[in-house]
Image (cartoon, rainbow, N blue to C red):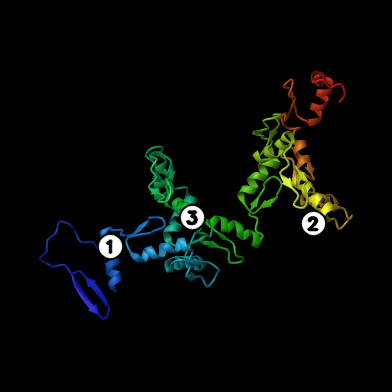
Amino acid sequence: MIFTRTGNSFEVKIEADSSDTTEYEHDDKPRTNIHTKRSLKDHKSTNDGEKQCRCTVCDKRFTTKHNLTVHSRRHTGEHLYSCSQCEKSFSSLSSLHGHKNIHTGKYKCTECGKCFESGNNLAVHRRSHSGQKPFECTVCSKPFTTAGNLVMHSRIHSGEKPYKCRMCDKAFSVSGHLNRHMRVHTGEKPYKCHMCDKAFSVSGHLNEHMRVHTGEKPYKCSLCNKSFSQLGNLQRHKRCVHSNRRPYQCPYCGKMFKTNRKVRLHVRVHTGAKPHSCRHCSERFMWLGQLKRHLLESHNEGTWLTCHICQKKFVCSGSFKTHILRHEGVKPYVCSECPKRFYISSNLKRHQLVHSDIRGFGCGLCAKSFKYKQHVVIHFKFKRCASRLGFSDM
């Protein structure tokens, strides 16, 4: 081994003695060129497998101080390197270089035209077209496209959670989940919106927020073509508007609902709860719309929503929008079972009962159930259930 020094830099060369004998054949792999003292130190620690540099936030360890410094920027949200072709910025120079490959199209998929940061990412992506999954779980035989995904999956079987929070008892099977959890303790929000002052602890939340500025709504309903900015909103829309499934039940009357929130609102009918109070007087209200109307009529607080066609005034934006749709003749709510369309979701929900066996209304005395509310009233009056309670007139 020969060290050749030139100023503050030096190079390591390994020369084999012709008289040396070894049981291993020499390979033709390229040797690492080391030009600085730090490079030599980093090279030695990498080959020794030592990880002496520990992150004080998430306990992750690194072989070099440089790698630790780059990693720490994930916690601080520091992005020193910006792309000149778009608005993205990165915590390391290598990440920026990889990102630039997307703009240049260096690693481009010939099947779909998508570009990637590296050849390895492109190779993994190609498996999505070929269907190749070369990594198989030895326990359940489930195949995966990458070795990393297989490792994470294997922890489901082993129950291994190697990433432990040093501030509470929680443990995680994936390091990324620990990093995200740590922000609960630190209050760190490294993902900042460049268009307003909002910051987020999870990158996905920032991506969703950006759609507020761009107006992008990538999630479209296949039944009524309504679009949403978040996947959760689309799923909730399908469950509430297009589905007849009602898994939530009122504990007082047995009425069935599509969401737990609607059960909580409905229960007020039975309990008489009035959670909305006026700040100007002692009046309390069961519904927010009632409070808004009271503030407008009694205290002149708030703004009426006025129809520009007929000058009718509204308190709630939902009622106002529905009213405008009636002028325009737009019926956005479509039945998934037949071609009928409706102005408001409640009319669609009522109509969907025609196609369903669901009986959401029940008599509390004889346990009979009905599709429609007025049928309960008729039953209560003419089937002598009222007289059993001492009511003669209904």
Q: CA distance from mark 2 to mark 3?
A: 40 Å
125 horizontally vs 22: left or right: right
Q: Position of residue 203 (x, y in %)?
A: 53, 57
Residue in the foreground of this view, choosing between 205 and 53: 53
Mark 3: amino acid: Arg
Query: Residue 376 lies in what quarter of the image?
Result: top right
Query: What is the secondary structure assignment of the residue under circle 1?
Result: helix
- Image quarter where the N terminus lies is bottom left
Instruction: Give me the disc on residue 301.
Output: 2
Badges 3 and 1: C-beta atoms under 8 Å apart?
A: no
Mark 1: amino acid: Ser
**Which residue sits furthest bottom?**
7
Q: CA distance from mark 3 to mark 1?
A: 30 Å
User: Which of marks 3 and 2 precedes in the sequence?
Assistant: 3
Q: Which residue is mark 1?
A: 45
86 up-or-down from 60: above or below: below
Which residue shows up at 50% across the image and 70% down it? 82
Q: CA distance from mark 2 to mark 1?
A: 69 Å
Q: Nearer the viewer, mark 2 or mark 1?
A: 2
Query: Residue 348 lies in what quarter of the image?
Result: top right
